[in-house]
Image (cartoon, grey):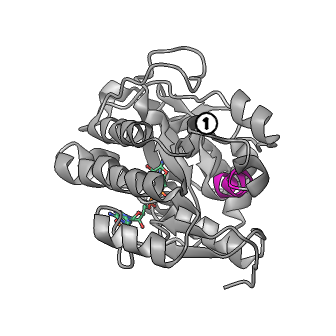
Amino acid sequence: MAGNGGDTRVLVTGSNGQLGMELQRLYKEGRFKEGPMLFADMDVLDICNWSDVRSYLGVNRINVVINAAAYTNVEQAETDESAAYAVNRDGVGVLAQVCAELGIYLVHISTDYVFDGTQDEPYREDDRPNPTGVYGASKRAGEEEMLKAGGDGLIVRTAWLYSAFGKNFVKTMMRLSRERSELHVVADQFGSPTWARDLAEALLVMIGAGHRAHKRGIEIFHYTNEEHCSWCEFAMAIMHKIHANCVVNPIATSEYPATCRRPMYSVLDKTKVKRVYGLYIPTWEAALDKMLADPELKIQ
Ligand SMILES: NC(=O)c1ccc[n+]([C@@H]2O[C@H](COP(=O)([O-])OP(=O)(O)OC[C@H]3O[C@@H](n4cnc5c(N)ncnc54)[C@H](OP(=O)(O)O)[C@@H]3O)[C@@H](O)[C@H]2O)c1
């Protein structure tokens, strides 16, 4: 643990996921100077366990929680509804209630999939959620738990996350580029690919004591990398950048076998997060270049 001696004591839950690992790496690089950060995944702290959560937060004198724990398998959630709701709604409810009770600032991560994708302009924080699948519905239910519990904190919605850590679209495309000469990828669903490291950096700014001091209640923010594309354009960019010999063919959503109905357009408007926190946000293509050069990137 880097020797940070400030007053802020941060806990990151779900710390072995993509976002959690990027937060761990930034902390090890000395990028958070306001106090110690503790990292706990499921094996150390199950966010669904009320008494464990209460005791962990109290004993460790935590005053900021970043909740990176979630059930994130969008397809599997359709047939495993109770598991998705257990973590994404009930686990968030536990964290939100305990944080509200103990006066802990909770930063919870949510998703673009709370929207139905019928809009043709970027979704703002106050646009009406209307999820199309179980994953999105369970994440929206988590947001509602947090709003209901009160207390102080942020709901930060992001989208299409990838990183050198864990499983994600970029790593899947890299693996498939070695196994196949041709791929078919959906070309009529649009969103903003987001490097988990960029989101992690933004979160470290957002939890800064200077910003927290001016925030009361729960506020929603949108954060993704800049600009948007279709899954097909994203796949083509990955293949191009890694010089793969694999042709990517566009197909329609209707031609792709999926159990979950995903939003067709889930681009998030980031005007608010840029204005309030003064953030510079890289484009998804610039972020992809950096991720592809990440020394941690290993493809099985
Ligand atoms: N991935 C995306 O494309 C995407 C898009 C939009 C929003 N988001 C949101 O962004 C956040 C971070 O996503 P991510 O991609 O970093 O997720 P991830 O890689 O799937 O990591 C989630 C972590 O949470 C852990 N976890 C699951 N249940 C838990 C529990 N009950 N208690 C404690 N930890 C638990 C998981 O452990 P196991 O692996 O052992 O289950 C995993 O280590 C999530 O809130 C997600 O909903 C993600």
* Residue 202 is a magenta residue: yes
Residue 99 to residue 284: above or below: below
Q: Is residue 17 left or right of residue 289?
A: left
Q: Exactly how many numbered labels are in the figure?
A: 1
- Is residue 221 in the magenta section? no
Please, what is the three-letter code of the amino acid marked with disc 1? Phe
The percent coordinates of residue 193 (x first, y second) are: 59, 43
Residue 24 drawn at (x, y percent): 62, 72
Residue at 47% from the left image edge and 70% from the top image edge: 57
Q: Tell me the quarter of the picture where residue 235 sits.
A: top right
Q: Quadrant of the N terminus?
A: bottom right
- Magenta residue span: 198-207
Residue underneath mark 1: 221
Q: Residue at x 53, y 74 (%)?
A: 39
Up-down: is 80 above or below 113?
below
Q: Regarding mark 1 in the picture, which secondary structure is present there? A: strand
Measured as percent of width and height from the top left, residue 106 is found at 53, 53
Q: Nearer the viewer, residue 183 or 129?
A: 129
The residue shown at (66%, 49%) is 240
**Nearer to the camera, 158 or 238:** 158
Tell me the quadrant of ligand 1.
Answer: bottom left
Neighbour class for label 1 at 10 Å: few (<14), some, many (≥20)?
many
Q: Residue at x 54, y 22 (%)?
A: 126
Residue 161 x/y as whole percent: 54, 50
